Amino acid sequence: MSLQTYHIIESTLREGEQFIGANFSQQDKIRIARALDAFGVEYLEMTSPLASPGSMADLRAITRLGLDARTLTHIRCRIDDAKIALETGVDGLDVVIGTSSQLRKFSHGLSIDAIIDLAAETLTWIREQAPEIELRFSTEDSFRSEEKELLQVYLAVDKLGVVDRFGVADTVGIATPTQVFRLVETLRRLTTADIEFHGHNDSGCAIANAFTALEAGATHIDTTVLGIGERNGITSLGGFIARMATYDRETTRRKYRLAQLRDLELLVSDLVDVDIPFNNPITGFSAFTHKAGIHAKAILNAPETYEALKPEDFGLTRYLSIAHKLTGWNAVKARAEQLGLALDDAQIKTLTRHIKTLADEQALTLDDVDELLHHWAGANHNAELVMVR
Ligand code: HCA
Ligand code: CU
């Protein structure tokens, strides 16, 4: 069920701002917010207004844009923070407090009982002040917290009946999909609120963990564009979209304007000064290229043979690479047809053998192969094949 009805909490303007290369101006943030809204994410999470005077002003400016996406800000579990956050006009507050022994010892120094008291006081106060606000309570470092203590905290907060959503956070990126499934499934069973998953990517599981959280009943997933965030970041929006589109293409196409993904990633990659990785899901430069002759032949017959995602859903095109030793005659024939050259199958097969021999000796380019095709099509069929560089 939640695999169709989930919501994306897009945190490029909060977690993403914690990326080493991010230093967004208000104009940058507005551009990112508009682009994310146009793409169709349901929520925008933004940096706490307490972070800096500019953060407060940016938050106000974005809440006034009148976007379809709901606006959230992320604050510590304190009445003083909540007071200021409520003045910004956001639709929701994401309240967080650390529960792992590491955070309790080295960050805020509170016991589990003190955390429960503080959460109760803060969350009840917020609900009294703002009956309509969307209120989320999350534990930082949920997966290194003692399960018993963690559940004590969530159950106590659930009893208050004031929050709409619980968050679980894999703050240091160590959770396995099985651990994520177990915790989300347990919370689903024992509590009544929606569930949000926030997963870091230190061990490469962020996308898988987000998907598993949905399988276990989570309702909201945190992402950032290109996965930017603290250290190597969190679940990337594009990677998560790839995961969901392979699972359920129609729902994903209905929920989001997929053809805007690439421009959205280019906007953010430009602002934070990184390249889109070659192996990025969907938009990596080789994501829809096919090389081996056996693959190329099948792709020409039916792209779904080797493509789980359709490039056209994302406004992209596939590319068949033919200028190499692994090439095959079907791909070479398709290229000849693209160039409008009349060559029969026997000629194409001979030419393909020649390309392979040449490629064993030197790197070839598509231009080289095109020249050979033109040469062969224009010349006597028995002419010696030459490489013109
Ligand atoms: C951080 C906090 C957080 C919070 C996640 C949440 C995390 O360490 O900067 O509010 O759910 O990863 O724990 O991003
Ligand atoms: Cu985080």
Image (cartoon, rainbow, N blue to C red):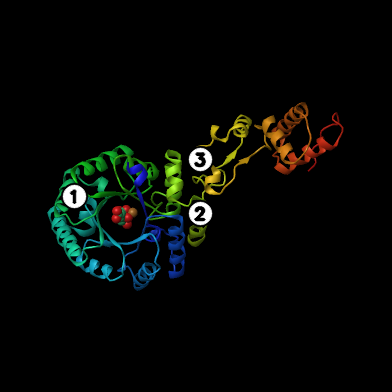
Q: Determine if residue 239 is in view.
A: no
Mark identifier at residue 309: 3
Rendered view: 193 above or below 381: below
The amino acid marked with disc number 2 is: Gln
Residue 273 % position (x, y)? 50, 59
Disc 1 to disc 3, C-alpha distance = 38 Å
Ligand 1 quadrant? Answer: bottom left
Rendered view: 52 above or below 94: below
Give the mark toward the camera: 1 or 2.
Answer: 2
Q: Name the residue under label 1.
A: 154
**Which residue is painted at 29% across and 61% down in the image?**
92
Give the mark toward the camera: 1 or 3.
Answer: 3
Counting residues from the start of the chain, the first of labels 2 and 3 encountered is 2
Q: Left of 176 or right of it: where is 250?
A: right
Disc 2 to disc 3, C-alpha distance = 16 Å
Q: Left of 255 or right of it: where is 260?
A: right
Q: Determine if residue 39 is in view.
A: yes
Viewer-proximal residue, 197 or 191?
191
For disc 3, the neighbor class at 10 Å (few under 14, some 14 to 19, many from 20) is: many
For disc 2, the neighbor class at 10 Å (few under 14, some 14 to 19, many from 20) is: some
**Which residue is painted at 20% across and 55% down in the image?**
105
Residue 258 % position (x, y)? 49, 50
The amino acid marked with disc number 3 is: Leu
Residue 37 % position (x, y)? 43, 59
Counting residues from the start of the chain, the first of labels 1 and 3 encountered is 1
Give the quarter of the figure containing the N terminus: top left
Mark identifier at residue 260: 2
Q: Left of 267 or right of it: where is 210?
A: left
